[in-house]
């Protein structure tokens, strides 16, 4: 699962910590509603100069999945014309979740450079306190692999994890606290780790607005040593809206800043006037 494109990292930013939960996994949604729309500007550090690398958009709408009520969550990331000259990036992520924040279906199509890969996950809940996954991965050569996975714990993909985690209450988190959860893509299920870094005030470069933020780091481990992948800032209110990301990638450093939003469910009480 170590394919960390900008779109993947964008979705780790709101995983506020899931201790293992037994399936099924319904939970009350307190953070978002239909028609929420978030837009981001992506920047990349190139020889000490920050250049615009592209955009990202997250949109949520009320919909149906197999005839039942669901939320349709759609994320698109696109590289700019300038960065396309060096590396093409067109990632599209789609997820359907129940109104109780249970994952139903996930798809990620990623065009990166000249390679196009597709991840898919189908979820079912047979009623015996387990969740069953059907996973499918198609690589850039068109080769397809399938996998079935059953777990007594809740399992999420990047998008459904984002949607669920936004309704968690982090008020009891302590600085340095490690938070772990299971995440699936089209070929694997792995345990992931976040570290809570505390609370900070942050002034947005794009809008000039200052927010009270919760700060988290997503890390991976190499030879038992912690390696930071991304540090992110989310608003310290019920929206838990991501406003800034600092990305530490294999090919350099990148940042993402929220530039526009609409149809938020809750008041923005984290804004400092």
Image (tube, grey):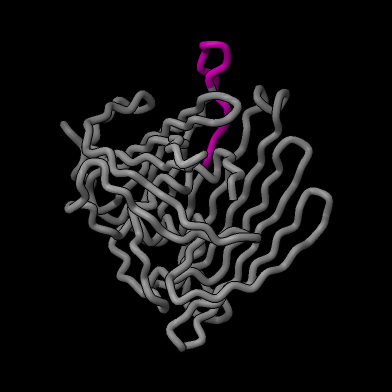
Check if residue 49 falls in the magenta segment.
Answer: yes
Q: Position of residue 100 (x, y in %)?
A: 37, 73
Please identify the quarter of the rendering in which residue 121 is found: bottom right
* Residue 67, quarter of picture: bottom right
Depicted 14 relative to depicted 202: above or below: below
Secondary structure mostly taken by the magenta-highlighted segment of the chain: strand
| Residue located 63% across and 29% down the image | 80
Considering every residue shown, the one lying at the far front of the view is 223
Which residue is pictured at 60% across the width and 26% down the height? 251
Q: Is residue 252 positioned above or below 195 on the image?
A: above
Name the residue at the bottom extreme: 127
Residue 152 in the image: state x and y as whole percent.
45, 76
Residue 256 relative to residue 85: left or right: left
From the viewer's side, name the closer residue of 109 and 227. 227
Residue 198 placement: quadrant: top left
Q: Nearer the viewer, residue 244 or 184?
A: 184
Tell me what residue is drawn at x 41 percent, y 61 percent: 34
Q: Is residue 37 magenta?
A: no
Q: What residue span does the magenta drawing correspond to?
A: 45-56
Give the image location of residue 88, x and y in percent. Answer: 70, 33
Would residue 151 be visible to someone looking at this image?
yes
Q: Exactly how many numbered labels are in the figure?
A: 0
Question: On the rendered structure, is 77 left or right of 231?
Answer: right
Res 259 seen here: no
Identify the residue at horizontal 52%, vertical 58% (top origin): 190
Q: Position of residue 205 (x, y in %)?
A: 36, 23
Q: Is residue 49 above or below residue 171?
A: above
Question: Which residue is situated farthest in the top direction here?
Answer: 48
For the C terminus, the image quarter is: top left
């Amino acid at each position: 699962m170590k394919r960390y494109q900008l779109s993947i990292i964008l979705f780790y930013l709101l995983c506020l910590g899931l201790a293992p939960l037994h399936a099924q996994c319904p939970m009350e949604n307190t953070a978002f509603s239909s028609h929420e729309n978030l837009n981001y500007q992506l920047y990349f550090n190139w020889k000490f100069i920050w250049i615009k690398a592209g955009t990202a958009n997250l949109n949520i709408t009320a919909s149906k999945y197999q005839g039942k009520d669901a939320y349709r969550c759609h994320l698109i990331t696109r590289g700019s014309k300038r960065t396309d000259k060096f590396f093409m990036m067109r990632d599209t992520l789609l997820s359907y979740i129940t109104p109780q924040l249970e994952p139903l279906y996930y798809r990620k199509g990623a065009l990166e450079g000249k390679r196009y890969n597709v991840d898919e996950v189908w979820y079912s809940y047979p009623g015996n306190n387990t969740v069953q996954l059907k996973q499918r991965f198609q690589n850039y050569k068109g080769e397809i692999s399938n996998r079935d996975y059953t777990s007594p714990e809740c399992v999420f993909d990047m998008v459904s994890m984002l949607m669920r985690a936004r309704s968690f209450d982090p008020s009891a988190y302590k600085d340095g606290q490690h938070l772990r959860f299971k995440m699936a893509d089209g070929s694997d299920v792995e345990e992931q780790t976040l570290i809570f870094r505390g609370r900070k005030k942050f002034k947005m470069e794009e809008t000039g607005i200052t927010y009270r933020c919760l700060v988290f780091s997503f890390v991976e481990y190499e030879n038992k040593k912690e390696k930071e992948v991304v540090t992110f800032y989310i608003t310290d209110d019920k929206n838990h809206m991501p406003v800034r990301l600092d990305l530490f990638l294999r090919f350099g450093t990148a940042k993402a800043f929220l530039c526009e939003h609409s149809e938020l469910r809750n008041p923005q009480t984290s804004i400092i006037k």
